[in-house]
């Protein structure tokens, strides 16, 4: 949100002379999986060209998981990969190029930004900023990027994505989302967030068997509650509250929420569940830490053929979009039409970049 000392009219003016004009809307580019790679790892880097077109976003990670000794190699590796990989990043390619820079209090971040923007600013779609605490962090990056973009002669603003991974960040989530027209979205950072909040899970994302509710006790022969009887328990979602807050803050500001890392690479089933919960709540994508998570994310964050068939039926039945109709014994009206349009529009965006999905959606026959 524009701060009180700034006129609303100034909000969409560049923050440096010669910098590109800020966007008034963040493009809805598909970003179901943001696949993390370590640009200092030769083996991983050599696989990047073949991944273009198979994943919506490739992200060169410079922050956590990159050893201090490899920070410079990672930064330089990313510059090389961006320059040498055809169709990666920029506005039109099938796969966006993002990076996660080091945190704003680290000794590396200034060199990250002053190296990357002049060298590959035309290919970098989004810069992910970790450990964002409040609007002031975004405003710092916003001005610096404008200066660097102006110097580099860039014509398109680089967008900014914040990781929500501190208690203060969560408390300030709305102001973070509204801090700059560059804001593209938010990801959950469950590992750092758990540590910062002093939560007692040591897992990276996902559930915890201790976080549960238990069925009421049955009565014993005397009609008293038998608390020691076998009772069903239901594991709850540790991250529900934070994701729900993120979704509202992002929707309010016209930007996009994402799940984050799911560290148990082997547990593809729980990973899929966690991603699907995020999708159902309003997230548009997630991180992928291993190629096998790309397929899960692409499946989960694409509306199913059944959902699209139903959504198109409602759209067809609702005519001018007002009033109410009965379909299969269920009431549909102006509001449920809007729910269906969310699905139909997402399917159109995804079909534009995913030929396999387009084929599935095109084959749907809608009977009245
Ligand atoms: C991600 O960065 C996390 O801390 O979970
Ligand atoms: Mg983190």
Image (spheres, rainbow, N blue to C red):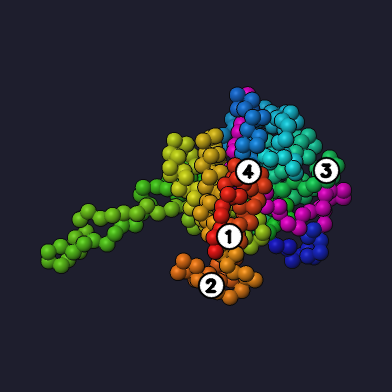
Q: Nearer the viewer, mark 1 or mark 3?
A: 1
Q: Secondary structure at mark 3?
A: loop
How far apart are the two marked residues, 2 and 4, measured between alpha carbons?
A: 33 Å
Residue at 36% from the left image edge and 47% from the top image edge: 209
Question: Would you say the residues marked 1 and 3 are in contact, meaning their CB atoms lie under 8 Å apart?
Answer: no
Kindly identify which residue carries mark 2: 325
Viewer can see residue 110: no
Q: Nearer the viewer, mark 2 or mark 3?
A: 2
Q: Is residue 165 left or right of residue 136?
A: left
Q: Nearer the viewer, mark 2 or mark 4?
A: 2
- Cβ of mark 1 under 8 Å from ligand 1: the answer is no
Among numbered discs 2 and 3, the one appearing first in the sequence: 3
Kindly identify which residue carries mark 3: 154
How far apart are the two marked residues, 2 and 1, measured between alpha carbons?
A: 14 Å
Residue at 67% from the left image edge and 27% from the top image edge: 73
State which region is magenta.
Answer: 13-42
Q: Residues within 10 Å of mark 2 (few under 14, many from 20)?
A: some
Picture layout, residue 142 above or below residue 254: above
Among numbered discs 2 and 1, the one appearing first in the sequence: 1
Kindly identify which residue carries mark 4: 354
Kindly identify which residue carries mark 1: 312
Q: Position of residue 287 (x, y in %)?
A: 56, 43
How far apart are the two marked residues, 4 and 1, measured between alpha carbons?
A: 19 Å
Question: Would you say the residues marked 2 and 3 are in contact, meaning their CB atoms lie under 8 Å apart?
Answer: no
The image quadrant of residue 95 is top right
The image quadrant of residue 253 is bottom right
Residue at 56% from the left image edge and 52% from the top image edge: 364
- Cβ of mark 3 under 8 Å from ligand 1: the answer is no
């Amino acid at each position: 949100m524009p701060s009180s000392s700034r006129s609303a009219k100034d909000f969409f003016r560049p923050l440096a002379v010669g910098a590109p004009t800020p966007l008034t809307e963040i493009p809805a580019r598909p970003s179901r999986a943001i696949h993390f790679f370590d640009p200092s790892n030769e083996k991983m880097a050599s696989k990047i060209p073949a991944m273009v077109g198979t994943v919506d976003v490739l992200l060169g990670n410079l922050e956590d998981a990159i050893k201090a000794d490899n920070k410079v190699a990672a930064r330089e590796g990313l510059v090389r990969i961006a320059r040498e990989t055809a169709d990666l990043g920029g506005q039109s390619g099938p796969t966006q190029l993002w990076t996660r820079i080091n945190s704003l209090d680290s000794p590396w971040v200034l060199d990250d930004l002053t190296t990357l923007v002049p060298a590959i600013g035309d290919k970098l779609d989004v810069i992910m900023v970790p450990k964002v605490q409040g609007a002031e962090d975004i405003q710092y990056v916003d001005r610096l990027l404008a200066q660097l973009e102006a110097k580099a002669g860039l014509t398109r603003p680089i967008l900014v994505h914040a990781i929500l991974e501190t208690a203060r960040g969560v408390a300030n989530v709305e102001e973070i989302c509204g801090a700059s027209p560059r804001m593209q979205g938010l990801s959950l950072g469950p590992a750092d967030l758990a540590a910062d909040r002093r939560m007692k899970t040591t897992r990276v994302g996902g559930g915890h068997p201790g976080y549960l509710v238990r069925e009421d006790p049955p009565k014993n022969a005397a009609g008293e509650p038998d608390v020691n009887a076998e009772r069903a328990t239901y594991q709850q979602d540790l991250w529900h509250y934070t994701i729900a807050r993120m979704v509202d803050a992002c929707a309010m500001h016209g930007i996009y929420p994402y799940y984050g890392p799911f560290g148990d690479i082997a547990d593809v089933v729980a990973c899929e569940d966690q991603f699907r919960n995020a999708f159902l709540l309003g997230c548009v994508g997630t991180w992928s830490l291993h190629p096998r998570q790309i397929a899960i994310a692409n499946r989960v964050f694409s509306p199913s053929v059944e959902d699209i068939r139903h959504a198109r039926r409602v759209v067809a039945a609702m005519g001018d979009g007002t009033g109410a109709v009965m379909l299969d014994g269920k009431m549909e009206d102006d509001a449920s039409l809007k729910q269906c349009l969310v699905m139909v529009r997402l399917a159109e965006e995804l079909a534009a970049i995913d030929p396999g999905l387009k084929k599935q959606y095109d084959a749907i026959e809608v009977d009245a």
